[in-house]
Amino acid sequence: MNDHERPLPAATPLPPHPPLAAYYGDEPEHQRFLRRIFDDTAADYERIEHVLAFGSGRWYRRCALERAGIASGHRVLDVGIGTGMVAREALPLIGPTGRLVGVDPSPGMMGQVALPGVELVRGKAEALPQPDASADFLSMGYALRHISDVAAAFSEFHRCLRPGGRLLVLEITRPAGALATGLLKTYMRLVVPQIARVVARQRQTPELWRYYWDTIEACIPPETVMLALRNAGFTDVQRHVELGIFSEYTARKPS
């Protein structure tokens, strides 16, 4: 068995990346930093994301949800709902008989969600305020790098999904090659913050997008993410990649 195939110990915490000393020291300071940066930049978040994705974000999120198996009538739990960008694409796919609950630790971000019929609950991925087996489909859009413990979060995802339920985790992954990594780093750390200074209303917004790249660069590799999903009890764990950087992790809770 190769090292990257060896199961992870169930009780071992798995942070998505090492502490980033440029932004915070210990874990309590990390949580305060995240609360501040997301609350303070919530009003600008979708505007900058639209620029970052060249306007293709909505189309891509909808395609990813369809590939992951979301369906009409599903009860959906959207973890890290943020301003509702994944939820917005999920709603027409689950239709009027579906139900969507969004969980996020940031009141500022959830305050930007304007989606009728969506239930918003404040909470974190590692301790979801939802009953066992209450969701048919669970999504998490670009929030994996901002939680504290990937293993604990995946365990909660497994608990909240019904048997046979499906999971989609969207994330931006560091490219494999040095040249591609350098180009993306330049874009994320230098170009996007400059754009943010022009179009953003909040002065903290450029800091958020620099932090975004630093978490991408330091994040655990895809193989570790997939191992953590298997270790949490998921099957059919797969990773689909678009443009070399957009990772779609999909999995199923056994029936």
Image (tube, rainbow, N blue to C red):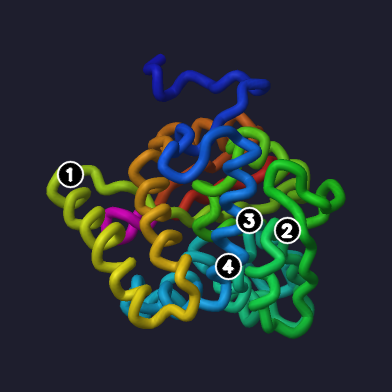
Residue at image position (78%, 81%) is: 117
Point out residue 163 in the picture as x, y percentages from the top left corner.
Answer: 75, 46
What SS does tag 1 mark? loop
- Boundaries of the magenta span: 241-246
**Mark 1 or 4, nearer chain start:** 4
**Mark 3 or 2, nearer chain start:** 3
**Are the residues flagged by discs 4 and 2 in contact, CB closer than 8 Å?**
no
Q: Which residue is mark 1?
A: 177
Label placed on residue 40:
4
Q: Is residue 20 visible?
A: yes
Disc 1 versus disc 4: distance between alpha carbons? 34 Å
Q: Amino acid at mark 4?
A: Asp
Point out residue 37 in the picture as x, y percentages from the top left corner.
Answer: 55, 59
**Mark 4 or 2, nearer chain start:** 4
Disc 4 versus disc 3: distance between alpha carbons? 8 Å
Q: Which residue is mark 2?
A: 136
What is the number of callouts on the image?
4
